[in-house]
Amino acid sequence: MSRLDLHSLPELRAQIPQVRFDAGVVPEKIPRQKAEDHIVDLAILRNPGIRPYLETGISRVASYSYFDELRNNWWCKPWSQSQYSGEAKPMPVPNVGFLPADALSRADSEYQQLQQLPDSVIVIGQRVLDYAKAHPEDSNIPEALALVVRAGHYACQRYSGSDKSEYTPVSKAAFELLHRRYPKSPWALKTRYYY
């Protein structure tokens, strides 16, 4: 997997202008790789239409940055053709005719590894929490924590009959850290509940 290079951000912004990649000023004492990873996490949280796979047919009708109140945001697993079809079958890796067999085999292996990861809110939320604890001086932390709480409520979810979401622990941890460390920030004032 390639890493985001801060020098490539202008080109990336030109390719997909609707996605917000800016991270403001990152303090110099934060390691570059950690700052780059956080920029990516923040971009994903700010743009709920981003998914790590391509959808066939008509995918999300709205732009990547549009926040869908009906929970068509980020991704759940197993990745399926439709998160709302009632089927929980993973999408097959498409057989792309121009790729050699070893590339298709590697793609299938990577796909299977990705299927083992938790849903978007848990993966991104935990990364934000870890970064926030290690680098509390980053001015983007309050926004990122608030967006994790929002994602815990509005990301796609499978309901099990319980009133608790599988995202509640991450949402609660982000909420508590936001209100403990940054209680007077605009993001804390806008984030009154966790889900």
Image: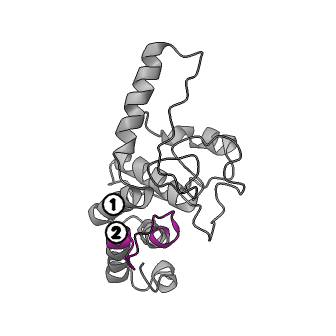
For numbered disc 1, what is the local secondary structure? helix
Task: Work out whether 178 lies above or below 50.
Answer: below
Can the viewer see residue 139 in this picture? no
> Residue 125, percent across and down?
38, 62
Asked whether 166 falls inside the magenta stretch, the response is: yes
Magenta segment range?
A: 151-170
Q: Which residue is drawn at 51% across and 64% down?
A: 155
Task: Work out whether 41 lies above or below 129.
Answer: above
* Residue 193: quadrant of the picture: bottom left
Q: Do the residues labelled 2 and 1 touch (CB within 8 Å)?
A: yes
The residue labelled by disc 2 is: 170
Q: What residue type is labelled 2?
A: Val
The one nearer the camera, 112 or 5, is 112
> Residue 168, percent across and down?
36, 73
Can the viewer see residue 54 in this picture? yes
The one nearer the camera, 185 or 193, is 193
Asked whether 108 falls inside the magenta stretch, the response is: no
* Residue 171: quadrant of the picture: bottom left
The residue labelled by disc 1 is: 126
Q: Quadrant of the C terminus?
A: bottom left
The one nearer the camera, 9 or 45, is 45
Q: Which amino acid does label 1 sit on?
A: Gln
Q: Please, which residue is most extreme toward the front here?
A: 86
